[in-house]
Structure formats: C-alpha cells, structure tokens
Amino acid sequence: MSESSEPIFDLCKLCLKQRQLCESHLMPKALYAPGRKGIQYATRLQSGQNPEHLKAHLLCSDCEQRFNKLGEWEVLRWLAPKARNKFPLHERLRVALPCGNTPRLAVYKGSDVGVDAEKFAYFTISVAWRRSIHEWSGFDGTPLPRWNLGAFGEQMRTFLSGEAGFPPDTAIMVIVCSDDYTRQFGRLPQLMWSIIAFEFIARGVYFRGLMGHHLHPDFHKVSCAVPHRRILHGHCRVMTEAKLQLLAVFPN
C-alpha cells in the first residue's frame, strides 16, 4: 500500500476480523523480477512485459505475516526466484538419494533433504485459497471468476488460520523440475479435472493440489503434507510444453 493511500478497513478474509487491510498478492511479490528481467507474459488474447502485480486488499497485516512465516518464506528460499543461475531445491535433490520412484519422477522425503515439506503444502493451499476468494483480473485484464470450492474452501481457510488441522481428503504434490526450460515460466493457479484440483508453476516447481472424498491412496503417498512429507523431482519439459499450448502463462 502506498503512503498516500487512504487506509482500508474491512473484514480480513482469513481471520474474519475487522482490520486494516494490506494489499495481498495472488502470487508472491518476489516472483516478479524488476527492470529488464521483468515478467513477460502471454495469454490467449495478448502478450507483453512487466504487467501490473496481481494484488487486492484481502488480509490484515497479522495474516499476511502468518502466510509468510508458515509457507512463503521457506518456499522462496528454495526457489531463489531472483537468481538466474541458481536453483537451490533442484541442486539439493540432484545429489540426494530418493526414497522411491514413480514411472517418471524420483520421490524424496522432505526431512531427508532438509526441506520443510509441510510449509510447501501450506504455501500451495494459501495461493489456491487466495485465488478462490476474490475475482481477480488476469494480466490482460480478463476477469478471473472466483472458484466455487464448496465446503473445501472453508476447510482451507480454517487450516490456514490455525483453527483446524490439514484439510481431510486432500493431497498436495510438489514437483521440482530438473529442466532449465520449465524454470523460465510461471502460471497462475488453474482448476483442473472433474474433482477439485488446482495447479500453478513458480520458478521450476509445480504446486498441485487435489481435494475429494475418494482420492486414490497413491496421491497421499506422494503428498508433501503430513504424514508422508514427500517432494518429487524429474524432467518436466515435455509436460510444460504441453501445458503452455493450452493455458495462459506468464514467463519470467
């Protein structure tokens, strides 16, 4: 919020208290590189560079700090979004021993590689929840309607606020991409598939959430949330190229 702006007092969407509200970013501010290295973006309607930050008055200062402390700071530390030749999370996994494998990806236990996987789960849900509670405008000005998540939306809010534990029937998958290509791109959260599923990309990492009463047990086994706390790692260029042909993206 600029110093010249009038303070805005309203209901904080997270704690549900009347507070002075901050400008909350949909995707973390740190993902927007300044100057000549600023974001380039492309949507179905247009492309450009250095778009306006996607932000709105949603949360009070205490809740903003909660998001930073319980998720965002840890994730950004491992993503190093301002660095062009450094990707700490990939570099750590590249020299670690996996605890298992899927057909395309290696599987790591967060605690074995020094990663607080639960904070990655918190961060993923916090971004998806912010996307769901507000009608944002895309980089090209296209309205992005709120997501109707039903009871899952309130489960996300109470988890994020500390009123309840991790949402039941939920799995969060974090896929760290070993290819340089995917590191160039970011994508706003998108809903997918017939169950409640969402995904976004930030600096070479896919953040994917699944919510439903009949999730296959295999999804929980590779979730970064409790109790398994897993992180996935592998080459993602083919998957990323396929997604870029279908969805609006904002390359960094």
Image (cartoon, rainbow, N blue to C red):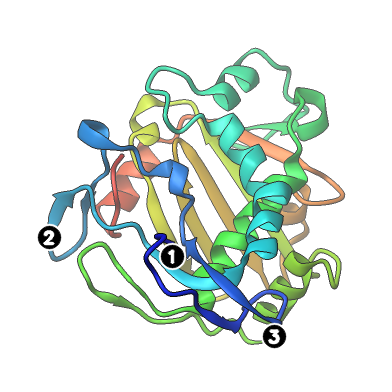
The structure residue drawn at horizontal position 55% and vertical position 60%, both measured from the top left corner, is: 127
Q: Nearer the viewer, residue 186 or 14?
A: 14
State the count of labels: 3
- Evaluate if marks 2 and 1 touch, with contact meaning CB atoms under 8 Å apart: no
Figure check: 175 above or below 180: below
Q: Residues within 10 Å of mark 3 (few under 14, many from 20)?
A: few
Query: Label for residue 151?
Result: 3
- Quarter containing the N terminus: bottom left
The structure residue drawn at horizontal position 49% and vertical position 70%, both measured from the top left corner, is: 131
Q: Nearer the viewer, residue 51 or 192?
A: 51
Q: Nearer the viewer, residue 213 or 250?
A: 250
State the image coordinates of residue 111 (x, y, percent, origin top left). 82, 31
The residue carrying mark 2 is 46
- Res 32 seen here: yes
Work out whether mark 1 precedes mark 3 in sequence or the reverse, and give the earlier one: 3
- Evaluate if marks 1 and 3 touch, with contact meaning CB atoms under 8 Å apart: no
Element under label 3? helix
User: In this view, which residue lies farthest toward the front?
Assistant: 4
Q: Residues within 10 Å of mark 1 (few under 14, many from 20)?
A: some
Work out whether mark 2 precedes mark 1 in sequence or the reverse, and give the earlier one: 2
Figure check: 32 above or below 93: below
The residue carrying mark 1 is 190
Mark 1 and mark 3: Cα distance apart in space = 19 Å
Going by the numbered disc 3, the residue's amino acid type is: Ala
State the image coordinates of residue 188 (x, y, percent, origin top left). 40, 58
